[in-house]
Image: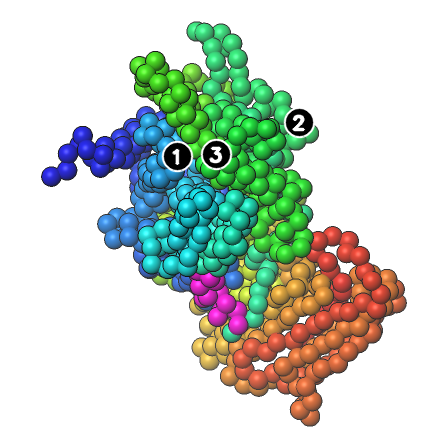
Amino acid sequence: MLRLASPAGKEILLYALGAALTVAILTLGMRLDRADFQAPFSYDFDALLILPFVKETVEGGHHWHTPRLGAPAGQDLHDFPVIDHLHLLVIRLLGWFWSSPEAVFNLYYVLTYPLTTLGSILAARRLGLSRASALLVGLLYAFQPYHYLRGQTHYFLSAYYVVPLTVLSLVEIARGKLPFFVATSAADGVKSFHRSWRNAHTFWAIAIAVLTSAAGAYYAFFACAFYVAAGLYAWMATRTVRAPLSAAAIVAIVSGCGLLHHLPTIVYQAENGRNNRPHVRLAEEAEIYGMKVAQLVLPVPGHNPVGLGDTVVFDPAAMRSAYQAPVLKELNESDWDPIGLIASIGYLSLLALCVLPARRGETTGPFAAFALYGTFLGTVGGLGALFNVLVSPQVRCYNRVSIYLAFFALLFVGRSLDLLFARCGTRAAALRSPIFVFLLAFGIWDQTNDQWFPDFRSPKPGYTSLVDQRNQAADRYYADREFFGRVETLLPEGMVFNFPFIEYPEARTYAEAGASGSVQSYESTLGYLHTRSLRWSFGSMKGREWDTWMRRLTGKEPPPQFLERIALVGFEGLLVDARGLNPRRWNNLKLELDQYLGPGALREVHPARRLYFFDLRNFRDTLIRSYGAAGFEARRTQELESLMVLWLKGFASYEPNGYEDRSRWCGETGQAVVVNRSQTTKAVTFSMKFRTIFKDRGALTIDADLADEQGNRWAETLEINGVEKPPEIERTLIVPPGRWTIRFRCRPYSQVLPADSRRELFTVLDFKMK
């Protein structure tokens, strides 16, 4: 029987105490005892991006395809891969016990706090910290401002409980404990390393690498960057090339597993064409979303003031406001990265150790090296910016490395406290517990702003507590559920078209000039979240077939043709969000809808959100009577099987919806895919113009999978320039059923310096198809 006084028993008590204190702080700070877990705690912005993933994972088993979004084909996420499979797996497991996606959404977010505490304690103990220091580090790391400021909006980033385990692996490599090798000491104290696969530390290093690859692409990327640093540090410390080789092997495991997580996307794009439009990143975004040291060490936004009674003695929040206002108001995500005073002291001390002639032990040395390296990697104008220019711009938010730096800093603080008490000996033993309790209480107070602990804080204008925010979200959630419940009662099954069209994913907030409000990027998912059988047009993947169809439809077609075409495809309802529409346009649109649909078509109104639901079934029946059943079906088939061109990898258009064919810009290479959705071969005439963006001449090579009527494949090289009026190129090609690729490549005759990181070289103008 395990005795609690034994070392193993004390360890179990330590983890139990850490979890219990975490739950207690959460309960007091967020009043979880008063929380309604059936309504999401956050109910706007990117929380509405994540909620459908959770819902489809709970109800359908995975998130890759959501049949009730992106109607009529369904939403497919292969072009926008969400590879946080560890988190989605836990969500799936929770879904076995709770059928409510909202409850699972909230529960997993709450669970990330004790999971982070436990992971941090484990890492701290393995790195030699005392139980008291490990508990302090674990709790302060779990309640980093990064955690709750990102919250459910950056849902998977808030689940950073694997980071402490990754840091443990990093530090062990830097200290010379190399995976795939076993160290033996010679008589002179020099270590030698022998290759060995069958040992515990190799097994755990591999396991941590696999977990890291599945716990978020950003954390995996930062882990690989730190593994490189760990290998180099160990190489210098042990003077054996096996150190960087060992680290490289771990990087290969993380990268290889990441590739496996992307395998569905790789297969899908090999079959359907590479589509980079949903995740276009620019190199300069590393500067926009870079880390700022000032943001790291300044107090958290809305910091609790220090006062006596009603008198404020010191307001730390004023320091941050002075830095941010007014010219630096746009600080993006880095405003969510403060690490608290205790961690800031540790972080700045580590940076100082890198330059001061002080002794750095086998543990402190790696902490200092990682802190310096992480700063160079993440800061504005640092190594991350160079990586984006020289390698790939897909990683843009380097400010997120701050959560690694916070853990290095807290580990150093814990280590320093242990050394301090060890040197003081028995004289300070009586003060040990009170000091740790004080540091914990102070750290939690310092890291949680004035939205926390609603029963204890003094109200401050401009801030609402987390409880108030949660209650407001719940009120909006239940109002929406009641509205969409009425819509589903009217239309138990079928498809509803969302208007105005908002692209997916990562669209900007939609608001026309002069609009009285705006529509957030993912608010159109509300219908899906609150219904069980209705299908919704929102969510078609940017750049694919139905996205292209909807852009043309909503951008160019007048109301009669627009209504007819969506009815032909099978939409039986129209949901108009009037907040983002210019009032004059909305009034005109409503009059036209009343004219063509009849005044009785408007069936439901959501006053708070200004949502208007129109029933299209009578309009559809009128079309059937007008065209006859056979004529209607023929027109429906024509609409569903219409031929289209998808401008995928390399292409971008900056024209309004429906007018993108006026000009499409491209870099050195581009790929267009011609899609014939019918079962018959068609002869299609393509006409377009080409011109360079630069003034000099260049060669444009076109290579297509299609041929003309004589069987000659379209493959030619054109000379184009940016000065002369471009001639129209017209080619008639035979397009069999299926998908056919046209590849473009532009080669300037002289050197062209890019105007920006998009590196665009030529444009396709006035594209037409007949």
User: Disc 1 versus disc 2: distance between alpha carbons?
Assistant: 32 Å
What secondary structure is found at the residue carrying circle 3? loop
Disc 2: which residue: 326
Q: Is residue 320 magenta?
A: no
In this view, the residue farthest toward the front is: 187
Task: Answer above or below: position of 131 versus 48.
Answer: above
The percent coordinates of residue 388 (x first, y second) are 64, 52
Of the 4 image quadrants, the one containing the N terminus is top left
The residue under label 3 is which amino acid type?
A: Gly
Indicate the colouring scheme: rainbow
Amino acid type at mark 1: Ala
In the image, which is nearer the foreground, mark 1 or mark 3? 3
Q: Would residue 265 be counted in the magenta stretch? A: yes
Q: Could you tell me which residue is drawn at 46 percent across and 66 percent down? A: 263
The answer, for residue 280, to whether it is visible in the render is yes
- Disc number at residue 142? 1
The residue at the point 44 percent across, 26 percent down is: 416
Mark 1 or mark 2, earlier in chain: 1
| Span highlighted in magenta in the image | 255-270
Badge number at residue 93: none
- The secondary structure making up most of the magenta span is helix
